[in-house]
Image (cartoon, coloured by chain):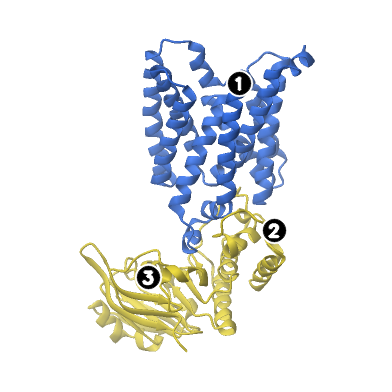
Chain colours: A blue, B yellow
Amino acid sequence: MFTDLLAQHFVHTALLAGAVVAVVAGAIGIFVVTRGASFAVHAISELGFTGAAGALVIGIDPVIGMIGGSLVVGLVLGLLSLRGRERDSAIGAVLAFGLGVGVLMLSLYHGYATEATNLLFGSIVGVSDRQLLELTVVALIVGAGLATCYRPLLFSSVDPEVAAARGVPLRALSVAIFLLLALTTAEAIQVVGVLLVLTLVITPAAAAQRLTARPGLALLLSIAIALVSTEGGILLSLEKSWPTSFFISAISFTAYVTARMFSSR
Amino acid sequence: MSAVVSVDKLALRFGARTLWEDLSFELASGEFLAVLGPNGTGKTSLIRILLGLLEPSSGRALVNERPPREARQHVGYVPQQRAFDRDLALRARDLVRLGLDGHRWGFSRLGDEGRADVDRALASVGASEYANAPIGRLSGGEQQRLRIAQALVADPALVLADEPLLSLDLAYQNTITSLLDDRRRTAGTPVLFVTHDINPVLGMVDKVLYLAPGNWAIGAPDEVLTSETLTQLYGTDVDVLRVRGRVVVVGTPDDQHVHHVDHEH
């Protein structure tokens, strides 16, 4: 049965889509963790849900609504470029209201309930060829953005004061990272769902940070952990018909716990 | 030889409050200038103006005969010691490297020449031993040595240091000040050193710029740090005492110098 499934086209599509998303999520996660912006990821994904639910109500592609919602929040958070406690409370306030609106949207929506469930919990095995193409295009945009900004982004994330003194444009980079994060989040929602975006964006990066202090290596490890979690999760869900999102989160969490237990750092 | 820093009739106002007016001074090759004064008199603002991060209300500042904004790549900046996250994926040498190319776009590897520059900077501050250690696991004093290496790695024409000794113990204070002193003696790099306490740098200072609320004075330490000058600056009776080779200022409205002398005993 497992090998039969492996020969199926939809499984190949799912594995490819998972790989594409894992690479960008693992990569951007390092910058998110370094900037201490994990909570922002949660806010962006929940507001992506609101956008998607709104799109369902007015009858357009929920993915468009999701990207729109994520980008709006990403832009606002990036422009505010708040730090510390002030940022946490601002994000909390925005997140709560956004989710409230999302709940309203869902109650107004009378279509298939599975659409909403898929948003919340992910639906990787339902990815079409066209969606795979969309995911790849967006991932290439995020990848190109991260590659271009890599060094100043690292500088402004770990050492903002000196970076500013050297002429690194902090605010522009803050906007850039949050917009790229919004795109990544919209991608990850399609694989693991709104509620589990953190498992691809935060957990692998947090694990990688425990394993090495080399910034470049941490980035590669984070991508590797995200990849193993996603592909492993998809394969396990073929074998046993539990939700893919559960397996993905279980593998990345195992990587994190192991990294914490056995890291020399 | 022309001045590395030239400040001409500089004024800084925030709303109705004037921090200083008509501030003019020059800093020549090899000079060590200490900027002293109580909190809120614009010491950090002066550094921000010289970094091109803040526009003065009027007047003009030039670094290397150019507007500060265009001279940033020739300025080494040392901020206050600020602890890094323990888990930050960044090694000592990565922090120093960011001083070399952190402002450049892209993600290319450092060439042989660049790596040699980083190694030399690490060695010059005695940090070779912990070059590969995670930055968050080093002591405040070790981190601040790396700050000096980071500021000097790109061979700057000017060093701006903003309270670099804060929260360091006496032994590390001496290390940091003698590293900067060496640099200006061997390479002729002038140093502008903002501090609330003159004593750690008393032996190496050529000029003191004393900023008092709405008033300022500049000159050799023996001219500026006198009861007459400070009484005139503050408009209230201030005594400057010399105790065992240390300067103690008594009677300023905030009396902070006395406080700090107490601290170091």
Q: Amino acid at mark 2?
A: Asn
Residue toward you, A40 or A186:
A186
Q: Amino acid at mark 1?
A: Ser
Residue B66 is marked as: none
In front of the other: label 3 or label 2?
3
Q: Is residue B246 left or right of residue A241?
A: left
**Count of numbered marks:** 3
Residue toward you, B92 or A235:
A235
Q: Chain of mark 2?
A: B
Q: Chain of mark 1?
A: A
Q: Amino acid at mark 3?
A: Leu
User: Which residue is labeled 1 in the image?
Assistant: A128
Q: Are marks 3 and 1 on the same chain?
A: no
User: Which residue is labeled 3 in the image?
Assistant: B46
Quadrant in which residue B67 is drawn:
bottom left
Q: Are marks 3 and 2 on the same chain?
A: yes
User: Which residue is labeled 2 in the image?
Assistant: B132
Residue A79 % position (x, y): 40, 45
Q: Are marks 1 and 2 in contact (CB under 8 Å)?
A: no
Disc 3 and disc 2: Cα gap in Å? 35 Å
| Residue B145 shows in the view | yes
Element type at marker 1?
loop
Q: Measured along the vertical axis of the image, is residue A138 above or below residue B99?
A: above
Q: Which comes before the other along the chain, label 3 or label 2?
A: 3
Q: Are marks 1 and 2 on the same chain?
A: no
